[in-house]
Image (cartoon, helix red, strand yellow):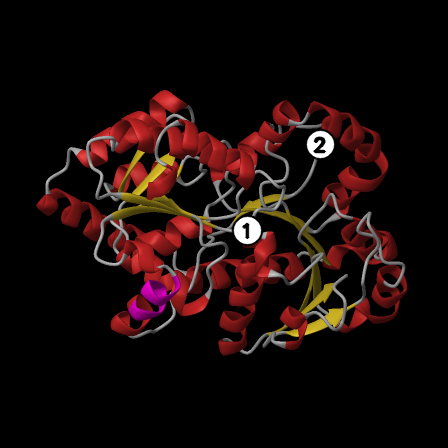
Amino acid sequence: MRILHVIPSMNLADGGPINWTICVSRELAKLGHVSEVATIDDPAAPWVASSDVVVHALGPGNKLGISRKVGPWIAQNHRGYDFVVLHTIFEHCCYAAWREMRRDKNRLVTFVHGFLDPYFNRAYPLKKIKKYLFWPWAIYPQLRDAAVTLFTTEEERILARQSFRPYRCNERVIAYGITKPQYDREKVLQAFHSAVPEVEGRPFLLYLSRIHPKKGVDLLIQAFAKVYADCPEYKLVIAGPDQVGIVAGLKELAQSHGVADRIIWPGMLNGDVKWGAFEACQAFTLPSHQENFGQVVAEAMSCSKPVLISNKVNIYQEVASSGGGIVENDDLEGTNKAFSRFKALSEPEVAAMGRAALSCFHEKFELEQSAKDFIRVLEEAAKSR
């Protein structure tokens, strides 16, 4: 099967859908399937040149994320693929692809990736108005016309129905997961400690994701200051790209709570350094206000690390039932509670929670099952044409 993924960028700093697209393409190649990606990246972008997946870079796009090359390219090439998968329904590139495939929509697939979570309407009311203006003629038709619309959890599927009207699509939930690379543990630990020497030999909690208001980083800082006030040896590593310019304000918050010298901001971590961070931490934390899946949660669990997450991370039920982490509300009281519960655990209890996290990862979140689910759904859609 030949599959084309349409997504604005292959830059991993832009979030989980890109990582899934890359990883599942590698996994599908093992099964004999061909995956390619169409983006509005600049062809000279380093992540295009370094990609091991074929990328058709049709940019650069303008400030609005529009590249006039997308529509004509899709019109000329889409018949060379069994399915075209739209990964960001609110972006122009996906609208342009849908527009060119309206007469061939039984080969169109939409992947929602949490973008229809009602959280966004509550958090960004002005953007909600803008989306409503585009919904009936540019966004909703992508869902309505697609052979299948994909969700990563049952929770996400149910929440998506609450955001906009009209709403009708052929819903399917597929497994979602990650591949843990093979690596030498000592080597990745060394890489991490070389990059972040401040925590070598010290216990620390790890946050590793985009630094964005929806992620609850402010809650992390306040909870860490309160719960670990009597543990001066403990550090908090907040790693990730500052996408919307809030790090300066967060550092001021840390200063006002007296923990600025105990929080490390190493920026985005990739490769061996990232996996070394997971291996070195005592626990991973993500008190997000909205998280469609949380690939970083699965990555931490694959390293036998307890995860301290909010009940707005859509895999929280799997985490809670497995015993591989602690789940609380996405507010300061909940984050305080999660940290306090973890702090109260004995070393054997922490180790047991880590083992449970690893078991949950193998059972629920390995990419191999995600790839098989994805192909199964596409094959079913092909048979129903």
| Percent of width and height locating residue 105 | 79, 54
Q: Is residue 191 magenta?
A: yes
The quarter of the picture where residue 139 lies is top right
Query: Which label lies toward us, 1 or 2?
Result: 1
The stretch in magenta equals 190-195
In the picture, measured across the screen, residue 279 lies left or right of residue 52, that is: left
Q: Which residue is the site of mark 1?
A: 241
- Categorize mark 1 by other alpha carbons within 10 Å: few (<14), some (14-19), many (20+): many
As drawn, 270 above or below 168 = below
As drawn, 90 above or below 23 = above
Secondary structure beneath disc 2?
A: loop
In the picture, measured across the screen, residue 206 lies left or right of residue 292, that is: left
Q: Earlier in the sequence, mark 1 or mark 2?
A: 2
Q: Answer whether residue 311 is visible to the viewer in this image.
A: no
Q: Which residue is the site of mark 2?
A: 167
| Percent of width and height locating residue 23 | 51, 66
